[in-house]
Amino acid sequence: MSTSSIPAWPRMTASDYQAFEALFAQSSAIGATRGGGLHRLAGSADDGAMRDAFCRWLRQQGFTVHIDPIGNIFGLLTLRPGAPWLLCGSHLDSQPAGGRFDGAVGVMAGAVAMASLARQLNVLPRAAQCNLAVVNWTNEEGARFQPSLIGSSVFTGASPLDVALNCRDAQGITLGEALERIGYRGTVLPEMPLAAYIELHVEQGPQLEQQKTQLGVVTATWAALKWQVTFHGEQNHTGPSLMACRRDALLAAAKTIVAVREEADKYGLALHTSVGRIETTPNSPNVVTREATLFIEFRSADEALLAAIGEQFTQTLQQIAQATATDVSLKASQLRPPQQLDAALVQRALTQAARLGISAMPMHTVAGHDAISLSYHCPSCLLFVPSQDGLSHNEREFTAQDDLHRGLDVLLALLADLCLHPTAQPEVSVC
């Protein structure tokens, strides 16, 4: 892609694409799985190795690196002292045996685009109105430590630092301890007023591919209701214990899993549900399960629907507990409300895509992203590039190089537009 028709306008170069490919290849190798994916959980040794590599690259490109108390990595380029900051990035942690594009693409793209923009602004007769910063957010995935979006939530003040640092993984290790082990417990970030936050991400769904569209600009996110539910039964021998007398927590969990799916079936495309994780005690093949914890999710664009389902499903859980002679408790509950992203930024992103000849469409996101956390703090924009077959959180996750490059083109064009004209309105409405 090119913006050659726009005189002296910053654009990606062949060397920029090469820098992105090299960085992305390095990311894909650290924590690589045999199936071509990535296993790089937050706070792990591989996470530490990737963070080290990323910080080295930033310093080599002239960024000042700062690590904050929750381990977020900021690469800072001061172009106009005292001016607000354009922040761009995503996350380097992955799901277990996940994909190598999710998160990492946004961090690498942000770093390369900002380094390129700063370099080009130094030679173009244009005055930067903002400073530039790229960020890697800690524990976006919520795979090892719950909840998700921890780093960005602490940054925006939505989550207390001490609570976040004391989140524990399945082995009882806290996030704070994990960050200490890899050397990424940092210090308070100097005051950083933000002009905007921009994130490039793979779609993780099929819409762009189905619509044969090259770029998505997110206008809003679905709400999400996340529960940790525990059934308490009685441990016993699976052989001689009488079937009628068993208090099997795993049986209760199984009935719940089916009930969660049946909720989605009632509402069609308006509701997505899942039970993505189950933990059992004592987890032995010849012992009736004493305790079973399920990680349940309900997602919808309609927050009122989620509220009604939450109330109704609480009764369903009680009925399952009664039918299985178990007790049930709600260990944790998190409601992430739906959120509208900044309409002016949506327009500006669509305008830049149109100027580049890239087909783009406004869309919603069902998945959570750091851009959603930031949207409560400053104007935020989330850009999507297509995911092959809509597959994500999977080793076979894939986005074609041409699609990645188009995403980089729009990202750089939008950053340049915001840096040079931070309060300008888009020239053309293309929604």
Image (tube, rainbow, N blue to C red):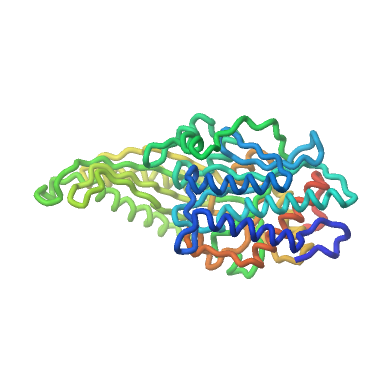
Residue 289: in sight, yes or no? yes
Image spot of residue 4 (x, y percent): 84, 64
Q: In this orientation, which residue lies closer to the viewer: 362 or 87?
A: 87
Q: In this orientation, which residue lies closer to the viewer: 260 or 404?
A: 404
Image quadrant where one finds the C terminus: bottom right
Q: Residue sitting at 40 percent across and 52 percent down?
A: 276
Q: Is residue 344 left or right of residue 156?
A: right
Where is 213 relative to 156, above or below? below
Report the number of discs: 0
| Residue closest to the far right | 125
Q: Residue sitting at 87 percent across and 52 percent down?
A: 124
Q: Residue sitting at 74 percent across and 50 percent down?
A: 115
Q: Residue sitting at 49 percent across and 60 percent down?
A: 37
Q: Is residue 328 left or right of residue 209?
A: left
Image spot of residue 104 (x, y percent): 58, 53
Q: In this orientation, which residue lies closer to the viewer: 22 or 273?
A: 22
Q: Is residue 269 left or right of residue 371?
A: left
| Residue closest to the far left | 240
Image spot of residue 161 (x, y percent): 54, 31
Q: Is residue 198 left or right of residue 164?
A: right
Image quadrant where one finds the N terminus: bottom right
Image spot of residue 259 (x, y percent): 34, 53
Residue 319: in sight, yes or no? no
